[in-house]
Image: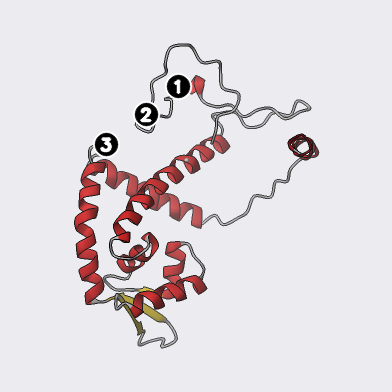
Amino acid sequence: MLPAMNLKRQTRMSAPTNSQGWPLMHDEQKPAVAAEPGGSKLPPSDSQADRLLRLVHWTSAASRHLRRRLAEVAEAFDLSDTELLVVWLCSGGGRVQVDLAGAIGISPAQMSGMVERLRSRGLVAMHRLAMDRRRQVWRTTGAGQTLLSHAGGQLNEFAAGVSGGLSDDEQHTAQALCERLAEAVSKNPRRPTAKATPAVRSDQQRASKEAA
């Protein structure tokens, strides 16, 4: 989940914090984006841009914490967190290799090497679709399902700990919102077209010279 800019002067009394030690901010305390030189103002703190940055910040922080705990569980089985996710994703009906790469967020070439490593350990197996023999579908093997079952015990313990801060209903809501967010972002692949203004480039050059 970005350091605040132009925060109002804080009082000497200690501000309340959340479970991660971050100060809780009221609307009037939220970070404001500094104005550009020359009088051109950037989006205020309640703008869509600011909300998007906060969304990126907090979803990233949550993901980092979750992936770190998942990696701790996966390490016991001599797997990375990503490899454990792949074994789980291939359970059930299996996944086409290119879809696996997209779901994990790595290149098809990287996924090709990963599923081959997992196949060499007997955790996944490759099948070909009857209607299209060129498409490779990877499915979790019996050994892979056994591994997932053992890992599930440790993950259940972690999930129980998370439930102390988020109820089951809240976790389901968070999952549903993340799924909708991922779908919404994937349907809007356009890249930003805005370019740095001369004033911004000038500030960057001046800061670079000062740092040197």
Determine which residue is flagged by label 2: 18
Q: Are marks 3 and 1 in contact (CB under 8 Å)?
A: no
* Secondary-structure class at tag 2: loop
Q: Are marks 1 and 2 in contact (CB under 8 Å)?
A: no
The residue lying toward the viewer, choosing from 58 and 184, is: 58
Give the amino acid type for the residue marked by disc 2 in the picture: Asn
The residue shown at (27%, 36%) is 165
The residue shown at (55%, 37%) is 48
The residue shown at (23%, 42%) is 161
**Picture quarter containing residue 200?**
top right
Determine which residue is flagged by label 1: 26
The residue shown at (48%, 23%) is 27
Relative image position of residue 108 (x, y in whole percent): 50, 72
Q: In the displayed structure, would residue 26 be above or below residue 142?
A: above
The residue lying toward the viewer, choosing from 49 and 33, is: 33
Determine which residue is flagged by label 3: 165
Relative image position of residue 91 (x, y in whole percent): 28, 70
Pointer 3: residues within 10 angstroms few (<14), some, or many (20+)?
few
Picture colour scheme:
secondary structure
* Earlier-in-chain disc, 1 versus 2: 2
Give the amino acid type for the residue marked by disc 1 in the picture: His
**C-alpha distance separating marks 2 and 3:** 11 Å
Give the amino acid type for the residue marked by disc 3 in the picture: Gly
